[in-house]
Amino acid sequence: MGVRRLSIVAALMTASLWLPVSDARAEAEVDVALVLAVDVSRSMDPDEQELQRQGFIDAFRSPQVQDAIRNGLLGRIIVTYFEWSGVDYQNVIIPWTIIDGSEAAMKFADGLHDNPIGRLRRTSISGAIDFGVKLLDQTGVEPIRRVIDISGDGPNSSGRGVVAARDEAIAKGITINGLPIMLKRPSGFGDMENLDLYYKGCVIGGEGAFLIPVRERQQFADAIRTKIIREIAALSAETQIQKIQADAPVNCLEGIAGCIAGTATDAICLPGDAHSSVMPAVLMTFSHLAPSSCM
């Protein structure tokens, strides 16, 4: 009897050890791990940067975003926010934060409100993507989806080729969405007329990828809120169709002085990532788009 009683006790102790593991695993799962990568290069005016920051603050304070989080499969997400400019500048403003309700969302927004905005030279979208990939390896949770959200007002002008960075991220199952900021007419080096086409052909990619251009200052808040809701809710393609500004060839090396020989994916960039074995599900309307190339 003594031996039997000890066996039962040992079995119960073993079971009790396993139960918290299951609970812990459930707590570690989230609907999406979302990296908000925000351009703070000097090509943006200070008031535009303020509008951009305020757009993210307002988004996480909005009932629509909070409802989208709550209505997810698990009802929680994990988010981080960092600023970027040149290849050597990526600054985490808010580290990985679990948002599982209104209180956590408001706290995240307050953290953005209380931190100053940086302002530096150059634009390295590739550096931002690479940094976002590293951050996604450090979440400490198990996300159903992994998303990098890139906002910026110009093409890649420093660091390695943006297409190579994008393709490597996509190959890891990461989706890259875009918020091209198109408030000003091109006036010099680093400016681009059809930045939305550049983001479509050279930046975004992965399952369910989409972009929302911002062409007017008053569009900032709505565009950011809409984009975050879509990223949280993983809405279907039918709900994400928008018409872009123009149909024109796009050079994925635009912003880099000259056309330098690089990797195969840097030398020519075809729409829909046709040069790559990974085909991003681009959810915009791009009819009769000519191949992007390095002329």
Image (cartoon, grey):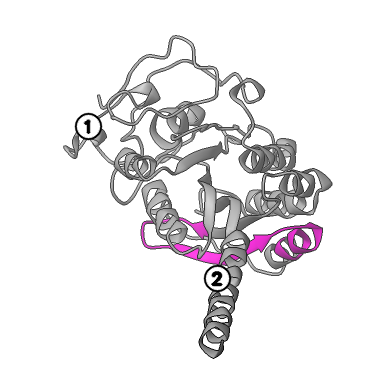
Amino acid type shown at disc 2: Trp
Instruction: Please give the name of the residue rendered at 63% of the width and 20% of the height, measured from the top-left corner.
Output: 238
Q: Is residue 141 left or right of residue 271?
A: right
Q: CA distance from mark 1 to mark 2?
A: 53 Å
Count of labels shown? 2
Residues in magenta? 83-108
On the image, the x and y values in percent for residue 3 come to 51, 87
Question: Considering the image in quadrants, where does the C terminus appear?
Answer: top left
- Occupied quadrant, residue 274: top left
Tag 2 residue: 18
Instruction: Please give the name of the residue rendered at 53% of the width and 38% of the height, measured from the top-left corner.
Output: 178
Mark closest to the chain's N terminus, 1 or 2: 2
Residue lying at the far left in this picture: please name it: 261
Question: Is residue 37 among the parts visible in the rendering?
Answer: no
Q: Is residue 7 left or right of residue 163?
A: right
Question: Considering the image in quadrants, where does the N terminus appear?
Answer: bottom right
Residue lying at the far front in this picture: please name it: 1
**Mark 2 crowd level (few <14, some 14–19, many ≥20, 10 Å Cα):** few
Question: Is residue 156 among the parts visible in the rendering?
Answer: yes
Tag 1 residue: 267
**As rendered, which of 15 and 196 lies closer to the eye?**
15
